[in-house]
């Protein structure tokens, strides 16, 4: 036995994973599986149906089609949560806008060293009552998942590194209108040293947002300090008529008396605000507004989609020509 040599066994490949997880098509269609799974795989409907019939999950558990985030398997709960926020931050079932929101929020999570889910769970997203996106196959749900999968599979970022976005309020308030919160202008003009928008992006952004926007009037504007050209719209309501004792007065017929009064209802803003028609901000052919804020970075618009515009943070102008 001393001269006997024992061979060593080395498997030619890793054993197949035959556990059932959860499955989607690359375009975001939900196929089925175990909700809350630790893994998500991409496959086709035909392959999934065959796996179900044969009860052989190894045929659809292809590691090259494993959905990953930050180099690790993205769990189903996180995938659905991210997709829910992306869906509700977007207006319509528009794959361009959904992709922009997905890439932009992911970019911000990377730059702030937060997980994608943690960022979207924070005040970064204003979506109320945040939860997981149900596994339904309506168009917007599928496209929302499609956009998230684009990020996970390393598709080229169509926002070119954007980290924030704004909607109609940016155009409506500019830096010259008292906004509904009784502050001057939109916050980006207070946070960055310049605001820059290439003309082609600006034109598309304006065209998508109509000619006016209305917001709830909180009744907090002061006529003496109100800035801009916005219009306060009132509505009539019936208000109890009260006597000196604070009790409602009754009429001769014994019924409580009411009077009609005007109360604040909406604030109507022209879109765009006057800042955007001031030619001094277009001297280089693009919109370029130096805010005077003492900070390192400005923002430059890289794309518009839906009714939103997406911003890249940059210390210098990104357009070909900038006013001197």
Image (cartoon, helix red, strand yellow):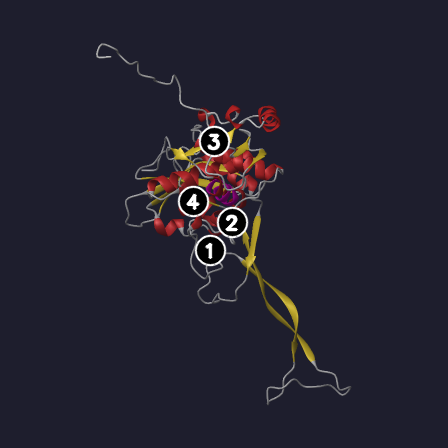
Q: CA distance from mark 4 to mark 2?
A: 11 Å
Circle 1 packing at 10 Å, graded few (<14), some (14-19), many (20+), is many
Which one is closest to the eye, mark 3 or mark 2?
2
Q: CA distance from mark 3 to mark 2?
A: 21 Å
Q: Which residue position holds label 4?
A: 117
Circle 3 packing at 10 Å, graded few (<14), some (14-19), many (20+), is some
Residue 124 position in % (x across, y down)? 42, 49
Q: Which residue position holds label 2?
A: 131
Report the magenta residues as a range: 78-85
Q: Which residue position holds label 1?
A: 177
- Identify the secondary structure beneath mark 4: helix
The secondary structure that most of the magenta stretch takes on is helix
Pointers 2 and 1 in contact (C-beta within 8 Å)? no
Quadrant of the snapshot with the N terminus: top left
Q: CA distance from mark 4 to mark 1?
A: 35 Å
Q: Which residue position holds label 3?
A: 150
Task: Name which residue lies at 70% across and 81% down.
Answer: 257
Task: Name which residue lies at 28% across and 14% down.
Answer: 6
Residue 2 position in % (x across, y down)? 21, 12
Which tag, 2 or 1, sits closer to the chain's start? Answer: 2
Q: CA distance from mark 4 to mark 3?
A: 16 Å
């Amino acid at each position: 036995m001393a001269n006997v040599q024992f061979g060593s066994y080395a498997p030619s490949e890793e054993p197949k994973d035959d556990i059932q997880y959860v499955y989607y098509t690359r375009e975001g269609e939900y196929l089925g599986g175990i909700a809350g799974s630790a893994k998500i795989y991409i496959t086709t409907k035909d392959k999934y149906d065959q796996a179900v019939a044969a009860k052989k999950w190894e045929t659809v558990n292809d590691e090259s089609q494993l959905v990953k985030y930050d180099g690790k398997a993205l769990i189903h709960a996180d995938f659905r949560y991210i997709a829910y926020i992306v869906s509700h931050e977007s207006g319509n079932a528009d794959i361009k806008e959904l992709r922009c929101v997905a890439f932009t929020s992911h970019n911000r999570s990377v730059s702030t060293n937060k997980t994608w889910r943690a960022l979207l769970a924070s005040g970064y997203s204003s979506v109320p009552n945040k939860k997981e996106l149900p596994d339904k196959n309506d168009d917007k749900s599928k496209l929302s998942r499609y956009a998230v999968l684009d990020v996970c599979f390393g598709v080229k970022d169509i926002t070119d590194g954007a980290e924030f976005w704004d909607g109609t309020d940016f155009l409506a308030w500019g830096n010259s209108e008292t906004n509904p919160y009784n502050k001057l202008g939109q916050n980006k003009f207070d946070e960055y040293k310049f605001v820059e928008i290439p003309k082609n992006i600006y034109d598309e952004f304006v065209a998508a947002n109509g000619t006016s926007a209305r917001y709830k009037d909180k009744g907090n504007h002061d006529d003496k300090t109100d800035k801009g050209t916005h219009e306060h719209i009132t509505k009539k309501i019936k208000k109890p008529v009260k006597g000196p004792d604070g009790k409602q007065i009754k009429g001769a017929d014994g019924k409580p008396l009411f009077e009609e009064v005007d109360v604040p209802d909406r604030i109507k803003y022209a879109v765009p605000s006057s800042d955007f028609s001031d030619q001094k901000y277009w001297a280089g052919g693009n919109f370029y507004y130096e805010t005077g804020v003492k900070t390192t970075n400005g923002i430059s618009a890289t794309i518009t989609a839906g009714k939103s515009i997406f911003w890249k943070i940059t210390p210098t102008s990104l357009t070909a020509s900038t006013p001197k």
